[in-house]
Image: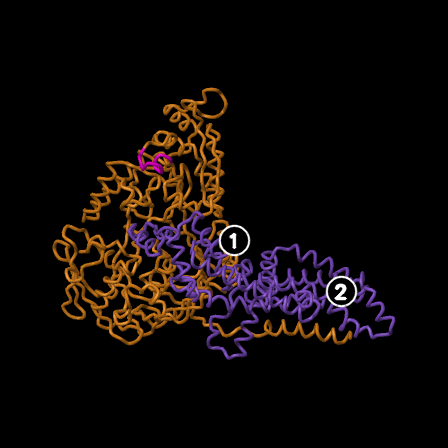
Amino acid sequence: MRSNRLFFLILIFSLLLIPACQKESPVNNDRVVTAIPSDIESVNPLFAFDLNEGNISELLYASLVEHGWNYQKGDMDTFPMLAKSWQWSKDSSSITLNLRDDVKWSDGQQFTANDVVFSFDLYSDPLIQSKLYGSFKNFYVDSSQHIDLKKTFTITNPYLLTINFKKNSTPSFYDIDFPIIPEHVYKNVSRKDFVTAEKEIKPVTNGAFYLAAWNKNQSIILKADTKSFLYKPGNVSEIIFKIVPDYNSRITQLKRGEIDLVQDVKADDFPILKKDENIDLVALKGREYDYVGWNNIDPDVYKKSKKIVPNKLFGNPLVRKALTYAINRNEILNEFLDNHGDLAWGPISPIFKSALDTTLSPLPYDVEKAKELLASAGWKDVDQSGVLKKNGQEFSFTLYIPAGNPRRDFVSTVIKNDLQAIGIKVNIEKLEPEVFFQKMYGRELNAWMAGWTIPIPIDLKPFWYSDFSEAPLNVECYKNKTVDALLNKIETTKSESQKNILYKEVQEQIYKDEPVTFLYWVDKIIAYNKKIQNLNVSPLGPFNRAWLWSVK
Amino acid sequence: MITFLFFLLRISPGDPSQKFLSPDLSPKLASLIKESFNLNAPLISQYETFLMNLCKGDFGISYTYRIPVIDVIKSFLPFTIIFSLISFVVQISFGFLLALISVRRINGIADKTFSKLSLMIYALPSFVVGVSLIFIFSELLNLFPSSGLSSFDSESFSFAQKLIDYSRHLILPVITLSLGGVAVYYKYLRDNLEEVYNKPFVENLRAHGFDEKYITRKHIIPNAVNPLISVAGVELGLLFGGALITEVIFALPGMGRLTVNAILSRDYPLVTGCTFVAGILVIITNLAADLIKAKLDKRVVKGILN
């Protein structure tokens, strides 16, 4: 009996150890593995809503032109891709594109101008619900926002295409910078069922990589298409997007060399990873800022009657300014972000050098100034209770934050303590993220903390325009006629330098009104294995032109 | 259950079309998508459509994956079932083995050690176990991979290599998921075995000179195991529902992660589908447990018939 038991135990341990003793399969040394926190939903650029979906689809599908970040001008440069050259008409109302004639789809079919026209057709079709639906403002569109193909496109030959833009519009390269999809693969798919039907179709691509495998919730494997015009011998042969939901697992695997690139590294981990001789770190000046939203209007009245009535607490710009003076934002930068960020004073990131108004500067932490402004707005500690009052009403409110975000937790505590010091009672309430955002987008909150990522190219209208139907992200309900006029003017201005002047004017107005308290711009920290060469981390992300990577 | 879930989801705060509100997207898209999800229709009409589709075995299209819910579940369920069954077998066999060793010498060194260890392990949250195992076996000893289900190149492996590859990836998750269960089954079985061990009919058999091995195999074990079958049925059903924490720590594609992500993104059809499948699996495992019980003990059948 005893020997039987011993045999059983030995058997179990052997079974456990056999796999462990097996050598790992030979690893492809020419491969880069990057970690992403969750699986993507589609590799089709039509439905690349998520950042990682965008990165992957742009590696699989080539665009007419590509963009790269120019650090000197703080703006984008345009390079040829599927279009090898182009000619704008004198009045910029049309562009003629010379397309490459050496591009083949991964199934061997030739790429032609028909694919381009078909792509514009699909992207703008309301039945498709693509990520670009509704954004073809400079094109001739019908009432359902679908591009009028006849008016818009003239195909001279399979490799010469002219795109005609709407009269008096202000087109740019951004209007034509998106991945092109193959007409021969999708032309017979019913538009009505396209969203579901396209999932059954194997991706046919024309970019630098092709999709080698997609193991759901495990990994997405892209292999270099050696026949692609973007491929050069010596370039990276494989990029793998490995799904690792747990942040600590991502960092552990980076240290072990199982993963080569991790984005959104926490500032806490920066010094530890910096000591690792195999890892390089980049703290990229960001496009993401955190802010405290003060609802400029009364949310209850707006909810009931859609009427605009100034908010009793935050309706006065003096009060909003005082609140900004009272919050010690430097403390947050030092303590939580370990100085991986910059104080913010407006909605334009410092990376946009040409558009940024450098004459403005962040309001300093100044408790006395805050008290003075509040007093001038009528908020005083009349009964020496330690709480400010006006017309018998206490200055107290609930600050809502989404649950599960340590940065918001920390910052909200700093805000609570700082405001308490000047006689304002703050109650912090955490809401489940979906609930929080529903209330925020519904303009139901009085005060909250959130963050925005600024799009490239700059587009301020969705955030600051008074007409909420055109500005779904103006959740603080900011209204300023001068800003509205400037934003409208930006839309019709062709000259980039003129646009930058207008952006500066918008910043001045917003600075004056302080509709929200801009807290800080957060640096995006990227950690990667030193074996990756030619990695160009720019505001466009680390995967911009990733086909140029090589592995040491 | 389905009706309750349908209304509960829709009256809960949150909006599935919310993720389409972004600075990069046109505001027109969110309203278009909301309309295509049929979320603008009155609740009763949504419910009617839902019931009609359900009768045809159609749970609808997942808002997230944009494919039929059944197809989404089909791609996640096989892993969960295999993973749960492996863990279940490990839990039962180790729990059983340790209980037998304990009961052979009640209050002996093995019994005392196992009893204390089982309490300690039971109290350990699975994320602590998982992270500790990764630290020891992946980071320090470099024996097993720290996450995933297979290697990137596994497609080119032979069958035997694939099997070894899966084993290497699954050992740590199986231990993480099973450790708590081993402790539970050990405690149950040990106490049951001890109780049966000292029952008069066992003493009687001993007095009649029956072999101890024979008594254990034919009388003690069947009597001790019987109450455990119902517990095992429920436990297996719960395992089939998904093991969220283990799946997240080891990045495994299971039903737990699928369900929670569906809830967080307000993917109503997928939440309903996942809950329905989990409910059905719990019913099946309980039914199987009852049938096994009836097979082992005819009195159960007699009791039902009477």
From the image, state the color of chain B.
Answer: purple
Residue behind mark 1: A272
Distance Cα–Cα, label 1 vs label 2: 52 Å
Q: Nearer the viewer, residue B219 or A465?
A: B219
Residue A373 magenta: no
**Which chain is the one coloured orange?**
A
Where is mark 2, residue-wise?
B193
- Residue at (29% x, 61% y) in the render: A128
Q: Tell which of A41 and B293 is nearer to you.
A: B293
Q: Nearer the viewer, residue B294 or A265?
A: B294
Nearer to me, A170 or A75: A170
- Residue A17 in percent (x, y) is at 63, 72
Q: Residue at x 60, y 57 (%)?
A: B126
Characterize the magenta stretch by its predominant secondary structure.
helix
Q: Amino acid at mark 1?
A: Ile
Looking at the rendering, the stretch of residues picked out in magenta corresponds to A300-308
Q: In the figure, A322 relative to A130: above or below?
A: above
